[in-house]
Every structure is written in structure tokens, then in C-alpha cells.
Image: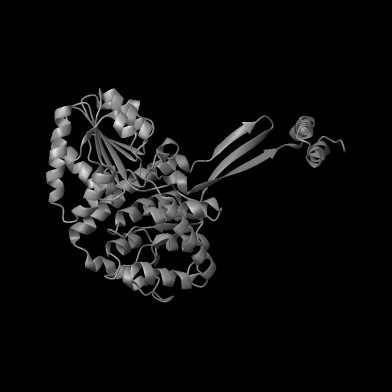
Amino acid sequence: MLRISTPEQFRKRPRPGIPKAVFAQARLIVEDVRSRGFAAVADYSRQLDGISVTERNLKLSRADIRSARKKLAPKQIRAMDEALERVGLVQSEIAKTALAETRVRVKDGFVLFRPRPVCRVGIYVPGGLAPLPSSLLMAGVTARAAGVKDLLVCTPPQKSGISAAIPYVARQLGITELYRIGGAQAVSAMAYGLPGVMEKADMICGPGNTYVAAAKQLVAAEGAVKIDLVAGPSEVMILADNTANPVYLAADLLAQAEHGPDSAAILLTDCESLAREVAERLERLSRRLKKRETANASLQRHGAIVLTRNMGEAAAIADEYAPEHVEIFAENAEKLVSMLQNTGAIFVNTCEAFADYGMSGGNHILPTGGTARFLSGLAVYDFLARTYVEAMTGREQKAVAGLAAAFADMEGLEAHTNAARQRGGTNS
């Protein structure tokens, strides 16, 4: 059973992150795939996934993608279609603002700030502990709303085959490139391409395990591609007072814990009796899970129940932690929302699991590991590059030529000074 901690004890606990050893191994894989291409991908698929892939079967055929629907139950199809509609509604509205051009008059000239979608996006869809077609849905719907035309998908190969839900969602999004590659090798393949097999992407998005997260950061640091954000391991902080339902709280904590052994599920409350009841229910509930080893490992390593002095302190701790998800079940929920700034998403008297499957309409690809302090959840904006278009009349250029030359002189850039003076009618 989870022990109840004080805020001071909680702050001293290490936060889950990407170990240096994982970064080192991911770097080796990324560089190997960059150097050897498909041969390296085939080796890692065999070594890490126990799957033999060839250049011919690496990519799913159009027939495989079309036939996926036949393997799904009607209710599964309705669930995915409903999520596609709800998430699409939100991102389409965001796109109206995100895709708008901004034109500013600057005295006798103008600046046009013009957004444009990136050309080619690679989406990583997790499939280790469980296939996550919901991640493809979140990334794909958002990219399409931004106007991205060229999408490809990489997902880890399974001995039993790829979950039919993934090619189904891909087809609904008009995606025809679906590759059976996982891990850091998939990230490297998308970033640098596989000659004769896969063209490289301009951007990579989607969550994954620590190796995927490390590889994404590595290829982005090299300038190979743009990435969306650091997504994973998953985390939730629940803020609850004595009005909260302990059954709901225990269920939501356990739902987060089953994402993986490095996930964090944390309850912050100022009610000691609620804290004890949630701890007891959580222990009983976890015993009933078929895959309880993963959830139990998560709770033991990174789970916590923190007894705070009041709900204001709970909100302050959450803002300091900057979690991926915050759930609020409290009488003064709206006030607590106003106190929170650093979080990926906030759920007011709402089950976060609904967001995982698109039912609340938001996006479940969110910043983790404290990066919510400066990153946002995936949205249309992430798939856009922006171009400045600038123009000045000849008269305006002549008017400011001397000022620009003075600036260039301060920085010791002689050629810049000359270029400016040319427009002013004065040679250097």
C-alpha cells in the first residue's frame, strides 16, 4: 500500500526521467541506422523485437491497410470514429487561428508573417506494452488539420502482427505509408531515411518509451528534424479535497500507473481520511488487474499520496512539479485551476482516461518530465513553420540607410555597412 507522504518528503523523491545509459544506447542505434540504413533496422528488429523484416515486408501493403476494418468489432470502429470526430472538431477550430496570416504595416513598408505546414511528418505509434492507435489518431488528426499532406507511420512489429486498429486509423486519415519499425531505430529511420525504402521526414511526433524519447531528442539536437515534444513517461497529479469520490481517485491513479513502470501517479489532498481510503482502495483494485506487475512497479517507484496543509499548497506543489496531467476533484475547482500554470492538461471533475481516447476532444500527446513549464500539448501550431515576408519602398530604405549603417558599424560588419549605404545613395 502507498504510504502517505508530507510535502517535504515528496519533494526529496527523484523524478522519473531518461537514464544516461538509455541516451548512450539510443545514440548508438541512431548512428548505426544512419550509417547502415535498412541493414541496421533489420538487425535491431531481429535482436530487440524477435521479428524478421525485409525491404519488401517492412511497409504494410495497401491491401493490408484496407482489410484491417474486417478484423475490428463494430463498437471498436464506432469508438475510433467518434474520437476522430471530436479531436478533429477541436483542431479544426484551432487551425482557423493558427493558419491565419498576419500583415503589419511598418511605416512605408510591410511585414507578412505567413504560416505553412511542414511537408512530411513521421508519426511514432507505441506498440510495446500495448498498441496505441489513439496516439496515431491524436497526431494524425492534428497534422491533417494543419494541412500536412505527407504522413508516414512507424510502429513496433509484433509476432502476432500489427493491431488492426492502427491501419484502420491510418486509412481514415488517408495515410498509406505504415512501417513495421519500433524503438530508436524507427526514429533514426524517419530522421535520416532508408535509401530505397523510406524517405526522411521533416518532423517526428508521437510518444514512446525512454529509448524513443531519447532518440527524438538526439536527432533534433543534430538538426535532422523537428520534433513535437518530450512525451513520456506518463504522469498524473490528482488534487482532491474531502468532497472527492475515493473510488474514482483510486481508479484514475491505477489507470495512469498501468502505462508503464516509469509512470507517475500522485494524489495531493488536504484530507487525511480520504488519503487513507484511496490508498486502501488502490491496493485492492490493483490486485484485480491482469497485468498488475506493470502498475505495481509504477506505484512502488513513482506513486505517491501527499497530505498537504490545504488545497492551495497542493496547487503550489503541482505547479512546481509541472505534470503532464492534473485532475481536480474539489469544491473550489475553478479557483485551483486559476492557480495552475505549469501543466500539460487540466481535467476538472473529469476522468483523464476519456482524454486518452479523444472523448474530451483535446490531445493526449502532452509534455512530461517537468517540460510543461515551457512546452504545450500537441496542436496545429506544432506542425507549422512560419515565414517572414518583408518589403520596404525605395524611399523607406533610403530613409533608414544611415541608421542601419550605424548599427552595422557598432557590430564591426563592414560589408553590412556598405550594403546599407548603397541604398542611401552613399558608397563606402
Q: How many marks?
A: 0
Residue 376 image offset from top left, x and y in percent: 41, 40
Q: Is residue 427 left or right of residue 215?
A: right
Q: Is residue 303 left or right of residue 41?
A: left
Residue 353 to residue 421: above or below: below
Residue 404 to residue 175: above or below: above
Q: Quadrant of the N terminus?
A: top left
Q: Quadrant of residue 178?
A: bottom left
Which residue is at 22% across, 46% downward?
A: 255
Residue 308 image offset from top left, x and y in percent: 25, 26
Q: Quadrant of the C terminus?
A: top right
Observer-nearest of 227 and 118: 227
Q: Is residue 161 left or right of residue 427?
A: left
Residue 328 image offset from top left, x and y in percent: 25, 32
Which residue is at 36% across, 35% downward?
A: 321
Q: Quadrant of residue 44?
A: bottom left
Q: Is residue 359 visible?
A: no
Residue 201 image offset from top left, x and y in percent: 50, 59
Which residue is at 28% across, 67% downward?
A: 68
Q: Specify how the rendered protein is coloured.
A: one colour
- Residue lying furthest right: 427
Q: Is residue 217 visible?
A: yes
